[in-house]
Amino acid sequence: MNVRISICFLLIMLQACAQNAEQGIGTRSKTAVLHHSPDTEKELINPAGNTVETRILTPPGYARTGTENNSFQEYLRELPLKPHHSKVKMYDGRFKENYEVYDAVIDLA
């Protein structure tokens, strides 16, 4: 019985995804492939920014959509960040050695 339900659910999800793709829902008219490089960082990272929204800039030709007050989207954009190039502390107290793989550290303390 559980297998039948799982198969039905999977088929419904595949059908919904196919309809969304046909209608262009969830797709973008432009695709940005961003590779971490010094040039990309200069264009997309504002070292003085102290929130996700002010630190991580949009690529040229793109714009952020508006948010509703008190929405989850607004909450994520307003998350406070530690200073640029702060180190990431791992679960066991050690610091991540390769800090070049991230551009921001959320300040949850």
Image: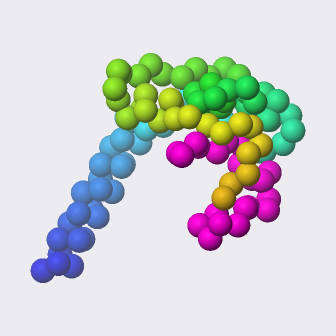
Q: Residue at x 35, y 21 (%)?
A: 69
Q: Residue 94 colored magenta?
A: yes
Work out whether 99 lies above or below 108. Answer: below
Q: Residue 85 or 15: which is nearer the viewer?
A: 85
Q: Position of residue 63 (x, y in %)?
A: 58, 20
Asked if residue 31 can be seen in this view, the reply is no
| Quadrant showing the N terminus | bottom left
Q: Residue, x 24% and y 57% (percent of image)?
A: 12
Q: Nearer the viewer, residue 42 or 89?
A: 89
Q: Which residues are magenta?
A: 90-109
Image point 68% across, 54% down: which residue?
88
Q: Main secondary structure of the magenta part?
A: loop
Q: State the residue at coordinates (80%, 35%).
A: 40
Place residue 3 in its image quadrant: bottom left
Q: Is residue 79 left or right of residue 74?
A: right
Q: In the shown orientation, is residue 30 left or right of residue 26?
A: right
Answer whether residue 29 is magenta in the image: no
Residue 77 shows in the view = yes
Residue 4, image x, y percentages: 17, 75
Q: Residue furthest left?
A: 1
Left or right: residue 99 versus residue 25 is right
Residue 52 vs residue 2: left or right? right
